[in-house]
Every structure is written in structure tokens, then in C-alpha cells.
């Protein structure tokens, strides 16, 4: 999203899911799939595994729903992978590191960082995780090593898969996490908040945005947006 853009929405409260909440109350992490979307996409995109767990470290907001702009920053774990999704703008780094410490983890324990896209409000604090391998749409980065590869279909574990979902920007990717409660999609700004905006005012191609949204909805039970609380996929505006 663009930090210069405002839309009139109600304020969002912090929400943690799948584990005990740190910055907000627990929420129902399960929802049914969007109706009218082909089930074949679910077979293709949804991870085979269902052993991942996740925790929303801080729930984001935009200018109209908070005092500024903050990203929704999430922690996802499966096996020996400890993943941070979109360590972007927050009111203070304690909004990321504090909830992580309550889970018994430090920044050095994180093995991977996933960047849904390259807007600063979603990437600002990536440098906190200096030991982590960083993933975007086209490559993996660690120290001084740059490994070119396409994110489409990349499996971090049997329960964690990346797919390309362009629309908000050309480089958007989504992390799909198979959990015991269903598939959770960490979508960046494919959706800003649970209530929209339906028409993304900064999207370069609204048709492409809608196609990516439908692809995600075909396989996801829960959506974790770029600047709001998680919500059931069946309620997603598209």
C-alpha cells in the first residue's frame, strides 16, 4: 500500500491466531473456502502438510485506521523453520521483538523472512533478522549470497509454500501455511484489511489483482492481510 493513501475504515484491534494472543485477543482461525471458485486450484496450491503454526506478532493499520501506517507482522513455524512474514513499519521495534520474546525467541532464532512485496511499509525492519534467509518473488538472499529462483510453487517445508500473486504490485507473493485448522494465506497487500479496499487504489492492474485474489481464495481458509487482522477467507471482498 502507499502510505500517502487514505480510505475511511473503522479501527482494527490486534489479533493473534493459532497461539495465545500477545497484542490482542484470540480469534477464530477457521473459515470455509470461497464459493464458486474451482477446487482444482486448491489441489494445486495448498501445501500437502498441515503441521505449521502461526502467531500474529502485531496487527497493522493504515492512516485511516490508526495513527500512522503499520504492517501486520506474523511468525510462522514448521519443523526447524521459523519464519517472519513482512517485518515492515511499526510504531517501535518492540512491537515485533516483544511478542517474539514472549514466544521464547530472539531475532537470531529466525531462519527465514518472507517479503510479500517491496514496498517499505512491508519491509522496513527486515534488518532485524540478520541470520535469516530472505525470500521474495525472484530470489533468496543471505549475507552476501544472492540465489536467483522463482517463488512460484517454492516449498520451504511440506506445510509452507510460496506462490506468485501479482496485483497490488508486480512482485507480490503469498505464503500458504498448512495448519491443523486449515490453510492460512499471508498475502501482504493483496488485501489491506478485512474490509478492503475492494478496489486497491494503488494497484497497477485491477484485473490481475482480482485473479490473484481468486487464486488465493480457492485454497485458503484464513487470510492474513497486509495491514489488518486475520479474517475468514469466505468473507474476503474480491
Image: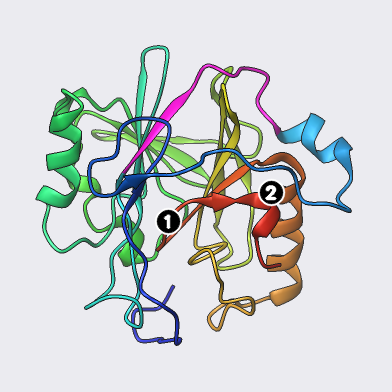
- Asked whether residue 107 is drawn in magenta, I would say no
Q: Quadrant of residue 7?
A: bottom left
As helix, strand or loop, the secondary structure at mark 1 comes to loop
Q: Quadrant of residue 20?
A: top left
Q: Main secondary structure of the magenta part?
A: loop
Q: Residues within 10 Å of mark 2 (few under 14, many from 20)?
A: many
Residue 215 to residue 195: above or below: above
Q: Nearer the viewer, mark 1 or mark 2?
A: 1
* Of 178 and 45, the residue lying toward us: 178
Tag 1 residue: 229
Q: Position of residue 14 (x, y in %)?
A: 31, 55
Q: Position of residue 152 (x, y in %)?
A: 64, 39
User: Residue at left 89%, top 53%?
Assistant: 36
The span from disc 1 to disc 2 (Cα, nearest Å) is: 17 Å
Magenta stretch in the rendered image: 46-56
User: Residue at left 48%, top 66%?
Assistant: 193
As helix, strand or loop, the secondary structure at mark 2 comes to helix
Mark linked to residue 216? 2
Residue 220 to residue 233: above or below: above
Image quarter in which the C terminus is found: bottom right
* Of 21 and 183, the residue lying toward us: 21
Q: Position of residue 1 (x, y in %)?
A: 44, 72
User: Residue at left 69%, top 31%?
Assistant: 46
Amino acid at each position: 500500500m502507499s502510505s500517502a493513501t487514505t480510505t475511511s475504515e473503522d479501527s482494527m484491534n490486534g489479533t493473534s491466531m493459532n497461539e495465545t494472543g500477545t497484542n490482542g485477543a484470540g480469534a477464530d482461525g477457521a473459515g470455509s473456502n470461497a464459493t464458486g471458485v474451482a477446487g482444482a486450484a486448491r489441489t494445486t496450491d495448498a501445501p500437502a502438510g498441515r503441521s505449521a503454526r502461526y502467531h500474529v506478532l502485531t496487527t497493522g493499520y493504515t492512516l485511516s485506521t490508526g495513527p500512522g501506517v503499520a504492517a501486520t507482522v506474523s511468525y510462522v513455524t514448521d519443523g526447524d523453520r521459523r519464519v517472519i512474514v513482512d517485518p515492515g513499519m511499526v510504531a517501535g521495534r518492540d512491537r515485533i521483538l516483544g511478542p517474539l520474546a514472549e514466544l521464547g525467541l530472539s531475532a537470531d532464532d529466525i531462519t527465514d523472512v518472507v517479503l510479500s512485496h517491496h514496498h517499505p511499509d512491508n519491509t522496513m525492519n527486515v534488518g532485524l533478522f540478520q541470520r535469516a534467509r530472505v525470500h521474495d518473488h525472484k530470489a533468496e538472499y543471505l549475507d552476501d549470497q544472492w540465489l536467483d529462483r522463482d517463488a512460484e510453487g517454492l516449498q520451504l517445508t511440506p506445510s509452507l509454500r510460496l506462490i506468485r500473486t501479482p496485483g497490488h504490485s508486480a512482485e507480490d507473493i503469498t505464503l500458504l501455511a498448512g495448519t491443523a485448522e486449515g490453510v492460512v494465506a499471508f498475502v501482504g497487500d493483496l488485501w489491506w484489511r478485512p474490509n478492503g479496499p475492494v478496489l486497491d487504489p494503488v494497484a497497477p492492474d485491477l484485473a490481475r489483482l482480482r485473479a490473484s485474489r481468486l487464486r488465493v481464495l480457492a485454497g485458503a481458509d484464513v487470510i492474513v492481510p497486509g495491514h489488518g487482522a486475520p479474517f475468514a477467507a469466505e468473507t474476503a471482498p474480491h
